[in-house]
Image: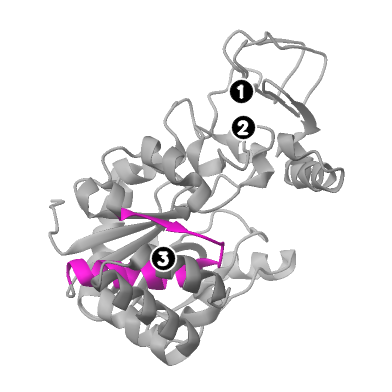
């Protein structure tokens, strides 16, 4: 039976831009603040915090985001204490984010186990997700830095993988042989058929003290910077020192900076309907579809059309009608309309690049 764990804190990484969801996603309202998965109007960040209960209550959640997103983030998760929304003055990738948040947790509870999760994923089976998290937390509490790997359902080339070793004593966790970069198609097919590789979903579990030791060993420059921030926080001057120090920290992912170098890592396999909501294609897959495979906005019409996604996000709620077209993404906002084949959903970033090049920043 799931139970509250008083020495567990969650760190939610919520600083991404989500440019593949333009025109819905903008600089001040990025992917994690949008309701992009399923039929819910719940922003992805809010869903991430909610489904952690009863393992981690909102008062033990820390959200790390950008300075420019502080107010919108606070509105999305009103139950998270405002002091526990950490605002990065500059994006520096996941290692500085996790190191800073872990030091914050250590001040609150030096013996705490930290759960690190992305803010913008979808989970189809939330009870199963919480059971896997409970297993990963138990593994981390025993002193093993642990991750959750997703049992692959297809030979995906867009994800990194984790090669799994032998089972470890005391639970379902297994040893991590190595982290593997995104493979080509043939290698991905081998991974899936071999049964010894999991998708790397970017979820990490560790005692705060263990992460501090790993950062000190593998990223000493980052460790020194975080130590300065931590000292300032204890003296009541954290905000000013963060503005000075954080932009100077090395920009590196936790995977490359720490996890790929660390020894004795554990992984818990998970099957709970995970989706990284990586593009409008994912939004179509997770949307409520009619008999023809269309995931339509309220009031939209599809005549002799199939497998389309329509989202109307403008204040006027225009009626979108599709006739005789298949496999399209159509997204309408107050100031922009996107029309793109679903199979090219990843290319939305090309629109963002073109707008930047043309100096049309009001659309970004």
x then y, percent, for residue 35 = 49, 32
Find out whether residue 348 is within the magenta segment.
no
Find out whether residue 86 is within the magenta segment.
yes
Q: Which residue is mark 3?
A: 240
Tell me, yes or no, whether the two marked residues, 2 and 1, touch with CB atoms within 8 Å: yes
Visible in this render: residue 57?
no
Tell me, yes or no, whether the two marked residues, 2 and 3, touch with CB atoms within 8 Å: no
In the image, the segment drawn in magenta is 84-109
x then y, percent, for residue 360 = 80, 38
- Vertically, is 298 above or below 138? above
Which of discs 1 and 3 lies nearer the camera? The answer is 3
x then y, percent, for residue 312 = 63, 19
- Vertically, is 193 above or below 287? below
Mark 3 secondary-structure assignment? helix
Q: Which of marks 1 and 2 precedes in the sequence?
A: 2
Quadrant, the C terminus = top right
Q: For the residue carrying disc 1, how many other residues have a C-alpha within 10 Å: few (<14), some (14-19), or many (20+)?
A: many
Mark 1 secondary-structure assignment? loop
Mark 2 and mark 1: span between their CA atoms?
6 Å
8 lies left or right of 351: left
Total numbered labels: 3
x then y, percent, for residue 47 = 38, 39
Q: For the residue carrying disc 2, how many other residues have a C-alpha within 10 Å: few (<14), some (14-19), or many (20+)?
A: many
| Most common SS among magenta residues | helix
In terms of depth relative to the viewer, which is nearer, 239 or 59? 239
Q: Which residue is mark 1?
A: 295
In terms of depth relative to the viewer, which is nearer, 307 or 66? 66
Visible in this render: residue 99?
yes
Mark 2 and mark 3: span between their CA atoms?
43 Å
Q: Which residue is mark 2?
A: 284
Which of discs 2 and 3 lies nearer the camera? The answer is 3
């Amino acid at each position: 039976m799931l139970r509250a764990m008083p020495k567990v804190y969650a760190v939610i990484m919520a600083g991404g831009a989500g440019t593949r969801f333009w025109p819905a996603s903008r600089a001040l309202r990025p992917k994690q603040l949008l309701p992009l998965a399923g039929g819910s109007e719940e922003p992805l960040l809010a869903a991430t915090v909610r489904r952690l209960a009863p393992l981690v209550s909102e008062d033990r959640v820390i959200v790390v985001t950008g300075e420019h997103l502080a107010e919108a983030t606070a509105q999305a998760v009103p139950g998270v204490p405002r002091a526990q929304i950490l605002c990065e003055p500059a994006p520096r990738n996941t290692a500085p984010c996790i190191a800073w948040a872990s030091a914050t947790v250590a001040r609150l509870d030096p013996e705490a186990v930290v759960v690190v999760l992305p803010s913008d994923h979808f989970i189809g089976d939330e009870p199963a997700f919480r059971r896997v998290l409970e297993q990963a937390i138990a593994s981390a509490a025993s002193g093993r830095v642990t991750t959750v790997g997703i049992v692959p359902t297809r030979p995906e080339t867009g994800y990194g993988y984790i090669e799994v070793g032998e089972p470890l004593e005391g639970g379902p966790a297994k040893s991590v042989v190595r982290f593997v970069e995104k493979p080509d198609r043939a290698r991905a097919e081998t991974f899936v058929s071999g049964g010894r590789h999991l998708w790397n979903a970017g979820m990490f579990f560790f005692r705060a003290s263990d992460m501090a030791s790993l950062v000190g060993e593998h990223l000493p420059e980052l460790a020194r910077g975080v130590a300065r921030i931590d000292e300032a926080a204890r003296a009541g001057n954290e905000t000013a020192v963060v503005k000075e120090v954080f932009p100077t920290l090395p920009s590196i992912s936790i995977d490359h900076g720490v996890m790929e170098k660390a020894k004795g890592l554990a992984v818990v396999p998970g099957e709970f309907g995970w989706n990284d909501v990586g593009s409008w294609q994912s939004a179509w897959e997770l949307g409520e579809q009619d008999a023809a495979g269309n995931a339509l906005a309220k009031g939209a019409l599809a005549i002799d059309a199939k497998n389309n996604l329509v989202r109307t996000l403008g204040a006027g709620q225009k009626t979108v009608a599709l006739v005789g077209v298949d496999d399209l993404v159509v997204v309408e906002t107050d100031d922009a309309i996107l029309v793109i084949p679903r199979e090219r959903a990843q290319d939305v970033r090309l629109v963002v690049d073109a707008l930047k090049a043309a100096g049309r920043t009001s659309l970004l």
